[in-house]
Image (cartoon, grey):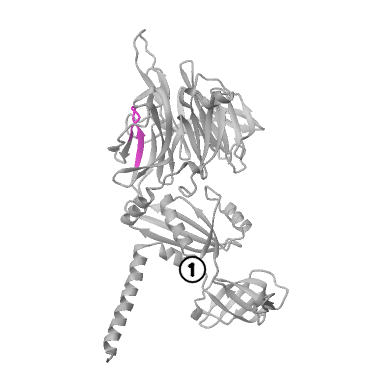
Amino acid sequence: MKINFKCLSIIFSLLLLCSFYSYAQDSQDNPYQSLMDEILLNFPSVSGKVITSHNNKGVINKGERDKLKVGLRINIYREDSSFIHPVTKEFLGKIEKQLALAEITSVKETEAEIKLLTKVEDNINDSLFKIPRSKIKALFFQGDINWYLADSYYQMLKDSGRFELIDSTMETLDMSKLSEEASKKEVDLVIIIDSDKKTDVTSIRQKLYWGKDFKAISDKTIILKPGYVQSLMTKALPLITSDSNILLTYQVPNTIKKIALADLNGDGSPDIILATENSFSIYQPSTDLKLLWDFSNFTSDQLLWIDSIDIDMSKRDSLIVTAYKDGEVRTSVYKLIDNNLKELVSLRNVFMRRLGNSLIGQEYSRSQGFESKIYYYDYKDGKLVRGAAVIIPEKVNLYDFSPIESPDGKKGLIVWDDKGFLTLYSSSGIISWRSAEDFGGFTTKIKRESPIFMIDRGEWSVKDRLVQKGGGVLAPKRKPLFGMAKGLGYKESEIKVLWWNGLSVEQITLIDKLDGEILDYGLLNDRLLVLCKPLMGIKPLNVLKGSNPFLNTLYVISVKGFYN
């Protein structure tokens, strides 16, 4: 049989073309590939010899031809004694004695100049060097970026087999602390990933640093098309946190109504604040709750809200407490001073809460509950000073809303209505979505005062906490014991995450089947803390055991991988 070499040549060329197209298509389909390539450019597999060295400088026998460039780092070593298998006596190689770490300072085609980064007592002339093709030990920090965008890249790095990834324990970026963490964990590389969302595109920014001295390597930004962002979001929707993610449960007194997380002493580790109508108990998170301080600073008929914020830029949080007593609302700011929780300032008949890094407030009316506009407040010279008005749709009150942002940069608000449904307001103030069912109503309600006896003017309520995190908004949902009969109590609760894809709102169940009624909750790094009250306020099993049945439960739930 005759072989038509011309025909084979054409077929082979077509196969090569198809392979190249397939690779190009994959790179186009996965824009993260260029970010990973940016990392790998700093770790080409290469080895060679040190030609000369003098005064912490030297020359090696490899250069641009071997993909070396300025800024790369090499390990300099000398081969020591042979390593022989103890049984078979087979030669397995030579033991390597590490001499120094060096950085390439200039490159030619076949050689490069280096600078030593570590002190060397031995002469390194004729010693060997290499950048080994081993796993790159990298510290991964996720900044201001939607979790599914960061997780997609994280999984890509992990699946490549080239990286040993270590999650940073930091929640907010502090370069000096991140440098310390990198040094402590002895990583080769630090990867910082964040996002800049604009009107029509989402950009992903990657900054690389050497782990040893935190010297900057590169800063690269890619653009993600809205369709690609949407595909990542859709893939993330099936993720549901299961019962196995419940790390710990604590039995706490049923007088505890609210929870807050705050770094009161400025040690960088937030503590858990459990609040009753007239006291604060401050605990250190651990296997068991460790009580740090217990304060009875105030009295109230009903605790309405508790928040924390660094109000005076001291790197120590203050507590913002709003309570109802004797027909009035009072907000107080407390700060830990000399191991005592002291009141810095208070305002009568003003509700307050934290919004981002700002403090906002709204006036109280006996007849209406919430009245007037919402304003920013600043702490100046020991006083809370009202500033500009918060731009927000009419009839949206202080505790009703949370900002939300779509992957393509559209800004909106998730808002509770008075019946317990969630709505989405666009930036133009138009309601563009409403939840199909209510989330169980609200438990903090107070009757409106009426000047005329026997006339019921209804109630006003403090809505449930909405927490913005990683592009989504967390919201609690309660399930009544019998259908819509909320007055008989709640059999179980769950936490939902709402994602706005730019057109509609998707709902994911983050954790479900929590016994009883959610009272309050908060996020502490990669843990979700949820305070629940049992059905009818009684734990039946405790009655059978002869234990105190009048207890609430504090759940500690892992959300690692969902937000970090």
Rendering quarter of residue 399: top left
Between residue 131 and residue 117, name the one nearer to us: 131
Between residue 61 and residue 186, name the one nearer to us: 186
Check the image and name the residue furthest to the bottom: 2
Q: Position of residue 216 (x, y in %)?
A: 54, 62
Vertical position of residue 509 compared to residue 483: above or below = below
Instruction: Report helix, strand or loop for mark 1.
Output: helix
Vertical position of residue 370 compared to residue 219: above or below = above
Instruction: Report the residue at 55% width, 53% height from top.
Output: 168
- In this figure, what is the number of numbered marks? 1
Instruction: Report the residue at 52% width, 20% height from top.
Output: 300
Q: Position of residue 124 (x, y in %)?
A: 68, 78
- Say whether residue 369 is visible: no
Identify the magenta region: 412-422
Check the image and name the residue furthest to the top: 453
Q: Position of residue 89 (x, y in %)?
A: 68, 79
- Say whether residue 47 is visible: yes
- Please indicate whether residue 227 sits to the left or right of residue 247 in the image: left
- Please state which amino acid type lies under the numbered disc 1: Leu
Between residue 395 and residue 77, name the one nearer to us: 77
- Can you say which quadrant of the picture contains the N terminus? bottom left
Q: Was residue 415 drawn as part of the magenta stretch in this picture?
A: yes
Between residue 264 and residue 85, name the one nearer to us: 85
Q: Position of residue 160 (x, y in %)?
A: 46, 64
Residue that mark 1 sits on: 40
* Disc 1: CA contacts within 10 A as few (<14), some (14-19) or many (>=20): few
- Please indicate whether residue 32 sits to the left or right of residue 118 in the image: left
Q: Was residue 103 drawn as part of the magenta stretch in this picture?
A: no
